[in-house]
Image: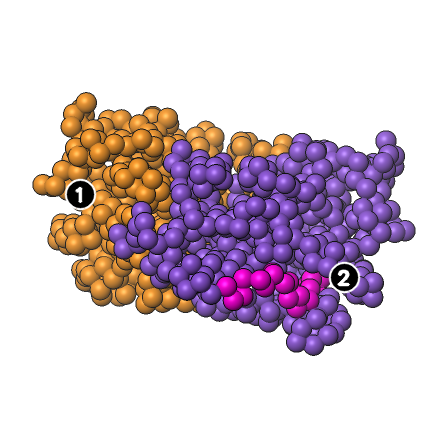
Chain colours: A purple, B orange
Amino acid sequence: MASAVGDSVRKRVIVIGGGFAGINAAMHLAKLPVDITLVDRRNHHTFQPLLYQVALAVLSPAEIAQPIRSILRDYRNMEVLMDEAVGFDLSERRVKLKTGAELEYDYLIVATGSTHSYFGRDDWAPLAPGLKTIEDATEIRRRVLLAFELAERQMQEQGSHPPLNFVIVGGGPTGVELAGAISDIARLYMARDFRHIDPASAKVLILEGSPNVLAAYPPDLQKKAVEQLAKLGVAVRTGARVTDIQPGYVMIGDEKLESAVTLWAAGVQASPLGKMLGLPVDRRGCVMVDQFLNPEGHPEIFICGDLAHVEENGKLVPGVAQPAMQMGTYAAKRIGLFLRQETTGDRTGLDIPFHYFDKGDMATIGRKAAVANIKWPFTARWSGLPAWVTWLVVHIFFLIGFRNRIAVFRQWAWTYLTFQDGARLITGSQELPGWDKNWSEEQASRTVDPVDNTFAAPKT
Amino acid sequence: MASAVGDSVRKRVIVIGGGFAGINAAMHLAKLPVDITLVDRRNHHTFQPLLYQVALAVLSPAEIAQPIRSILRDYRNMEVLMDEAVGFDLSERRVKLKTGAELEYDYLIVATGSTHSYFGRDDWAPLAPGLKTIEDATEIRRRVLLAFELAERQMQEQGSHPPLNFVIVGGGPTGVELAGAISDIARLYMARDFRHIDPASAKVLILEGSPNVLAAYPPDLQKKAVEQLAKLGVAVRTGARVTDIQPGYVMIGDEKLESAVTLWAAGVQASPLGKMLGLPVDRRGCVMVDQFLNPEGHPEIFICGDLAHVEENGKLVPGVAQPAMQMGTYAAKRIGLFLRQETTGDRTGLDIPFHYFDKGDMATIGRKAAVANIKWPFTARWSGLPAWVTWLVVHIFFLIGFRNRIAVFRQWAWTYLTFQDGARLITGSQELPGWDKNWSEEQASRTVDPVDNTFAAPKT
């Protein structure tokens, strides 16, 4: 149809990955006289900063995910291909797809992001799901909600139930946001739903291997975060290295922590495509690129987003949404400069390296609380309600699609005003790995450690 | 906590099933001096009349499903138990639960509804999913949307793709609604999303074994329905008995129909609980009950909804939402009469049998079209826009929960005005059973039968 596939005059640009980097690259490329093919194995772009709200049943998947086709449908020089890149021929400038087909390119943008890293313990994955995709989010939702249902049932039928302990491995933004949200659900939204258990008795624990949560934030905000978490009854243990995860519990050395639901918010690693390129990668599998986001010797290839190992004044550009969007935009604009140079010979701007314009970082800590390390348009370190409101506004603003902005705003308003919540659905299996169906009073008697609220069970 | 479990004075009522019958029974029972336990294996009530809109990506699951706890949370004499009944001891008045526990009752209401019947060919189930649960709906959504994505991909990479044929087995309301909605998606909502395929080229076929679609409707409305379906490009073949379903095709005798996605809207059978009761059941497994909805010899047991075989003046009461709600209400009120009789000896009303107050039937046929056989408050047979508007109003009115009504109305308004649609997500597996990845021009040349648009392939 309309688009000029195989047209030899126009340059072909392939964008792999429909995340923040890929979508932004595509939108800017669309203005150029090129033919673009965006390849993603999923049919939707996911607004990852709000994924945890799907995981905790505040938002519905469709409110934070948009079909990539719909986002890009109006660009006639754009094709969206639901397929998976499985290999590259950099000399022939070809991308091999899972279906066996190959696509030729003049310029290539690879932005396939990152995935969970279980530090070599992939057997932990089914026991402690992470949060990267819509499927992850609904699985976490399923487990968290199911734990309360099973506890209520067991309390009614047997008079006791395993402790409602939620262990979150990793104290980064995702871990903190998940912890705060679980606490909210338990204390606020489900308060009146149960007859036999008190949802507020649920305990949430963050296990962080490093000395501090929110490592990327200044110490005073880290402190504020821990304070706000404490207000929500969320316990934080830093310097706590998880040595094993099993159904129903987590080990720290020889200390056993009972856990009804364990969530993974610790390590990330680059998407395997990084290695497939056959170019130098770092320890996490991120592709080493120069200041123009090009791997050495490949000015026609751009690596963007989490997949790129970009250093600026010796510091690594973080793997979050902002730099990803900026990299995508930079790559697209640079391709524009190349095109102009070829036609007019004008090299202006081609010497401008990528620069990460850091507007700051924000993390919510449950309802009405957050920390914000603001660097633009002014410098400020906020916490509590002001930070939370800022977070709200910024995230609604950056949501793709007017409709979603309205929907999400309406949903939030409704939820926060009424404590009601319509997305609390348990779908799929009704089994919870490691849940003890015969939990006894005897066991119950030796659970929660009242002192530090980190529910250590006796050593085994 | 609050509710008086084990209190010997108050009667205990167990309601099994959180569908239309169960929820209505529970809400009316809540006003009586009884302790109620509603048991459902799911945590949510599903508004089944709108399930097909989730299946076709117009609505999100959370917009038509509501946690049962939330619906009933304000009734202090109500317990909701997420568990499954697996057996009964009618003499001891006990219900056995999957978890091994047993519940005692003074009155029992069983309303576990119906499930798909593949007429003994359960091997067809994975090849032709039916539409009863939220999971069913998202699975159908996945298959329908995936078919278009695979076709687009194959067209771009290989220049041909298997025909976008959607075969719906069964011409009842569900089949007709699914067919109309698929046609809508293809012709309206996805029109501008693809570059290589024309979504409008998708063909939808209803296979109905009996001589007419919408058998429960008067002949003139059946005719109107077929006309409106034809306008949407939906072909109908009546008297067509499916003899086999395989990945990629459906057999009618020795005639092979290529099918990208096959959906099941044909047979239903009663939930297995009917048989578990050990009481007389009919051919479909529905429990035979008298005019008071009691199985013979058990005035303390009420069978409601699809599970009940109720005849009124020799005609079977249909297995749809309206009678289910009415039965639930009737059972609850009758229990109230029993209680009054026990205390005051007043038998007034105990001789009033259940009567199905039939307000009529409606089925939508895609956007802006429907048939309505209205019997109350006036008699009328409508089709087209008026019927569709009536359908809209009635279904919004009966949605449980103010919030959902607003949300659904807003979503509909948005969708029907803009042809935009935010719920078009493909989640889960990305394989489509029977999709031919190597579909050739040669095959393509011998597909769609242009004459009657029912895409018969050459006999094999």
Find residue B236 and name its label.
Answer: 1
Left or right: A273 as drawn, with respect to A4 = right
Q: Secondary structure at mark 1?
A: strand
Q: Residue A250 or B120: which is nearer the viewer?
A: A250
For the residues labelled 1 and 2, say whether their Cβ atoms are less than 8 Å apart: no
Q: Position of residue A109 (x, y in %)?
A: 50, 50
Left or right: A425 as drawn, with respect to B229 = right
Q: Is residue B402 visible?
A: no
Q: Which residue shows up at 21% across the image and 38% down it?
A: B208
Determine the CA span between mark 1 and mark 2.
63 Å
Q: Which quadrant holds the C terminus of chain A?
A: top right
Q: Is residue B383 above or below residue A163?
A: below
Mark 1 is on which residue type? Val
Q: Is residue B192 visible?
A: yes
Q: Which residue shows up at 9% across the image and 41% down it?
A: B451
Q: Residues within 10 Å of mark 2 (few under 14, many from 20)?
A: many
Left or right: A414 as drawn, with respect to B296 = right
Where is mark 2, residue-wise? A217
Q: Which quadrant of the structure image shows residue A21?
A: bottom right
Find residue B403 and name its label.
Answer: none
What range is drawn magenta here? A347-370
Q: Is residue A84 above or below residue A293?
A: above
Q: Chain of mark 1?
A: B
Judged by its main secondary structure, the magenta piece is: loop
Q: Which residue shows up at 37% across the image and 26% down it?
A: B123
Q: Residue B418 or A173: which is nearer the viewer?
A: A173
Is residue A449 located in the magenta-colored stretch of the structure?
no
Mark 2 is on which residue type? Tyr
Query: Which numbered mark, 1 or 2, is in the foreground of this view?
Result: 2
